[in-house]
Image (cartoon, helix red, strand yellow):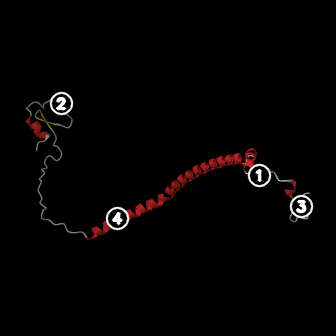
Amino acid sequence: MATMAAVYRRMPAGSLTAATPPPGGEETDGVFQLRPFPFEDVYWHHKRIDNSRVVRQPDPGARLKCWRGLGLSALVALAMIFLSLPNALGTIAGYRTQELEAERAGLLAEKARMEVQEAALLSPQRLEQLAPEMELRDPLPQQILTLNPKADGTLAGLVQSK
């Protein structure tokens, strides 16, 4: 294992000599030596372990933990759905309200068009044009009946004009 100390040992003599020692260095006969590095004396040995013949024992509690986790996840999902349901229903109701308001505006516009069309069909000028085609005439004075209300509050009686 190569360390900085081994590199310094390979350098030519005199390359590390200087007039003043560096901070932390010690002078021994004019040659400066470095302090040892941490864990320089530790050697790591790697041993290969073969676990191919080892059979894993089933854990009886693992299945229960798995089902508990699934149940808890389902419960959390249902809680999130339940908590977001009012907001979603409010949004759907808002869209439905907009649709109904648009439908109402359309129906009001159609009603206005139909009222204009009805007014045109029931105008006196048009009725005068249709009267000869349908053989309609003004009533004679003998055919007109007038209802006169009584002063005592009872129903009006039929009075024929003369």
Kind of element beneath mark 2: loop
Task: For label 2, count other residues whose C-alpha is less than 10 Å away and answer few (under 14), some (14-19) or many (20+).
Answer: few
Cβ atoms at labels 1 and 3 below 8 Å apart: no
Q: Is residue 19 above or below residue 98?
A: above
Question: In this figure, which residue is indicated by the disc labeled 1?
Answer: 136
Question: In this figure, which residue is indicated by the disc labeled 4?
Answer: 70
The kind of residue tagged 2 is Thr
What is the CA distance from the residue labelled 2 to the residue labelled 3?
146 Å
Q: Left of 4 or right of it: where is 140?
A: right
What is the CA distance from the residue labelled 1 to the residue labelled 3?
25 Å
Q: Nearer the viewer, residue 140 or 59?
A: 140
Counting residues from the start of the chain, the first of labels 2 and 4 encountered is: 2
Question: In this figure, which residue is indicated by the disc labeled 3?
Answer: 159
Cβ atoms at labels 1 and 4 below 8 Å apart: no
Task: For label 1, count other residues whose C-alpha is less than 10 Å away and answer few (under 14), some (14-19) or many (20+).
Answer: few
**Quarter of the figure with residue 157:** bottom right
What is the CA distance from the residue labelled 2 to the residue labelled 4?
72 Å
Counting residues from the start of the chain, the first of labels 1 and 3 encountered is: 1
What is the CA distance from the residue labelled 1 to the residue labelled 4?
86 Å
Q: Nearer the viewer, residue 123 or 71?
A: 123
Numbered label attached to residue 25? none
Q: Residue at x 67, y 47 (%)?
A: 117
The kind of residue tagged 3 is Val
Question: In this figure, which residue is indicated by the disc labeled 2?
Answer: 20
Counting residues from the start of the chain, the first of labels 1 and 4 encountered is: 4
The kind of residue tagged 4 is Leu
Image coordinates for residue 98, horizontal then vertical, percent: 56, 50
Image coordinates for residue 3, horizontal then vertical, percent: 13, 41
Q: Residue at x 91, y 65 (%)?
A: 152
